[in-house]
Image (cartoon, rainbow, N blue to C red):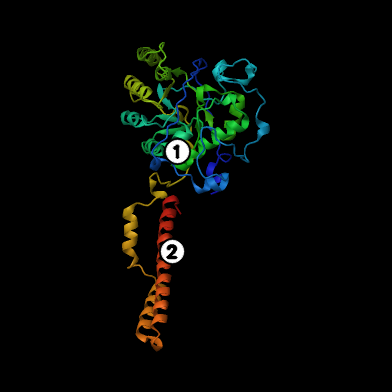
Amino acid sequence: MRLSQLLILHLCPLVFASPQDKNATLNETSNYVNTPTIGELNARTPFPKWLTDFTGLKEWPGLDPPYISLDFIDMKKIPNYLQHQQNQCGVNPREACSFDCDSCVAHDDVHTCPKLSQTFDDGPSTATPQLLGNLKHKTTFFTLGINVVNHADIYKQIVQAGHLLGSHTWSHAYLPGLTNEQIIAQLEWSIWAMNATAGHVPKWFRPPYGGIDNRVRAIIRQFGMQAVLWDHDTFDWKLVSNDPNMSEETIYRNVEEWKKSNTGLILEHDGAQRSVDVGINVLKMIGDDQLTVAKCVGGNDYLRVFPNFELTDEDDDYDDEEDEEDEEDEEDDISSDDRDIDNEVANLKKKKIHGKKRSLVIQEKVLKKVRRKNLIKRRKARKRTKLVRKRTNN
């Protein structure tokens, strides 16, 4: 599989949306970072061969993903604004259009919605299934790549339920504080995680902490993605970090105020049980008349969805029942070559050439060994055929 098949980014036209509310001033300036959790080994996304072929690596990275050069990223198109850490504002001119520092929204940033709608960041986590069980409408999840591959089973549950998935970087890095190469690494590994786990390439991207300026935008646009911000913040992360100045009652009072206009995108998190509990209560307050981010602006769900991508674990591992069926079928599925070998063995037994029993036994064993090898090859070929049929639609 070629890189152009993996990303299909430079071939996909962008569907830009104009913000509908110019008064977006709420910023996510938390110190809360959802700690990526390690899932069960058999629930993780296997590192695919196509990614090994392209990157030369054999396993998913840790919190600091390596930079892999991409031929469609033009570094000359990235403006030379200074790197800075979170809350270190004022190092760049206002024209850098920083959302977290200056509440600046670019022409193609999505930050509101004609219907009051929830969005959830930082998953998937072990708390996410509880949220899924309460959702009767389609919503938007912005996922961390490292959590996607470590909780592949939960990610697939979200996909199978029909919700919209967007990127939230690989490991929740504050992008304005990174080099261009580091930003690219955070994005590409997030995209590859989603592609390898569910066979789609994200269209929508939410920057952690709202950390985005025109340098960051110049990079995400070259990936074909579009930034999604918000105009309502629950600050549910403060509950997770035990901030004494935040309470659930405060959140619910804010939601009641937001309901009066009944418009906007609400920032929430599904990376912890406490924030999921709050999200479920907010859902009960708002109801199910909500939209996904794509529906809010009339855009596409994804840049690319690979058809017939298998969402079960059978792509790479075959269950015991299937192996047993293969073994049972072996004797009934002997090829014409194997039959010739059987006939040869039978003839040798009858002839007993010059009484050379030892020679006969040796020849018989050799022929049986050949037959066993043929059976093994045929068995592997059947598995490869099943794998190809599951992954392609030709």
Q: Quadrant of residue 351?
A: bottom left
Residue 44: % across, % down: 42, 40
Which mark identifies residue 225? Answer: none
Residue 300 is at least partly visible in this image: no
Left or right, 276 with respect to 232, comes to left
Which residue position is annotated with label 1?
A: 149
The relative height of residue 297 versus residue 103 in the rendered view (above or below) is below
Residue 78: % across, % down: 65, 29
Q: Quadrant of residue 252?
A: top left
- Mark 1: few, some, or many residues within 10 Å (few <14, many ≥20)? many
Which residue position is annotated with label 2?
A: 377
Q: Check the image and name the residue furthest to the top.
A: 245
Looking at the picture, tell me which residue is in the foreground, 98 or 288: 98
Say which amino acid is labelled 2: Lys
Task: Check disc 2 and report its element: helix, strand or loop.
Answer: helix
Task: Check disc 1 and report its element: helix, strand or loop.
Answer: helix
Q: Residue at x 42, y 60 (%)?
A: 380
Residue 114: % across, % down: 43, 22
The relative height of residue 236 versus residue 132 in the rendered view (above or below) is above
Looking at the picture, tell me which residue is in the foreground, 174 or 294: 174
Looking at the picture, tell me which residue is in the foreground, 187 or 344: 344
How many numbered discs, if any? 2
Say which label, 1 or 2, has the lower sequence index: 1
- Mark 2: few, some, or many residues within 10 Å (few <14, many ≥20)? few
